[in-house]
Image (tube, rainbow, N blue to C red):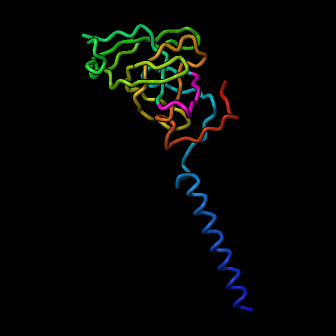
Amino acid sequence: MKIKKLSLSAIAVTALFVFNSCEQQSTGGTSDRVIIGETALVEVTELGQSLLARTDTGARTTSINAVDVVIKDASEEEKENIGKAVSFNVINADGESFALESKISGVVHVRNAQGSETRYQVPLTLNWGGVSKTIDVNLRDRSAMTYKLLLGRDWLAEEFYVDVDISED
């Protein structure tokens, strides 16, 4: 009888170990990820404001609504502008404008339904759900769009799972 009890205990422990291993593999080995919805009110540290953002796992990079972009001593060759000072205005969904200055950290080529375009990037710190991450955000006129901030995989990666049934609208 003792052998049967030991065998059942061993089977239970083995099953628990296998289940736990499978769960870790399916979550990338971590359970520290936060669930974010299809929309979220995200604080942009440099603005001192929060913007209603849309999560987009199909977008590689994060974009913010930026207008009146002015590069100091701009060059016609976009890559030569990396490291230069840039000023721009971020306009929220209520039409309020916030002036920002930064340095251009990169240039990206983005393909979308309208074709492809080149965008400048600046470092911004985005905060939501206890996660604060500084990433290079591309500047784009999103004034015709509902969401003035689009969260791409560069911000979502390694920190979040997206649940489209959750919304902060």
Q: Is residue 58 magenta?
A: yes
Q: Say above or below: 130 vs 121.
A: below
Image quadrant holding the N terminus, namely: bottom right
| Residue at (45, 24) in percent of width and height | 110
Relative image position of residue 33 (x, y in whole percent): 55, 45
Q: Is residue 168 left or right of residue 123?
A: right
Residue 130 lies left or right of residue 169; in this view the side is left
* Residue located 50% across and 20% down the image: 49
- Residue 99 is situated, as x and y percent measured from the top left of the image, at 41, 11
Residue nearest the viewer, comparing 118 with 70: 118
Q: Quadrant of residue 70?
A: top left
Residue found at x 63% / y 31%: 38
In the image, residue 69 lies at what x, y percent?
Answer: 39, 10
| Left or right of residue 72, residue 95 in this image | right
Query: Relative to 105, is 1 above or below?
Result: below
- Region in magenta: 52-60
Image-quadrant location for residue 163 = top right
Q: Quadrant of the C terminus?
A: top right
Nearest the camera: 37 or 63? 63
Residue lying at 67% horizontally and 77% vertically, measured from the top left? 11
Q: Residue furthest right?
A: 1
Q: Name the spot of residue 146 as percent of width and height, x first.
A: 61, 16
Who is closer to the viewer here, 125 or 156? 156
Task: Specify whether 143 is left or right of 19.
Answer: left
Residue 162 within the segment the image draws in magenta: no
How many numbered dots are placed on residues in this image? 0
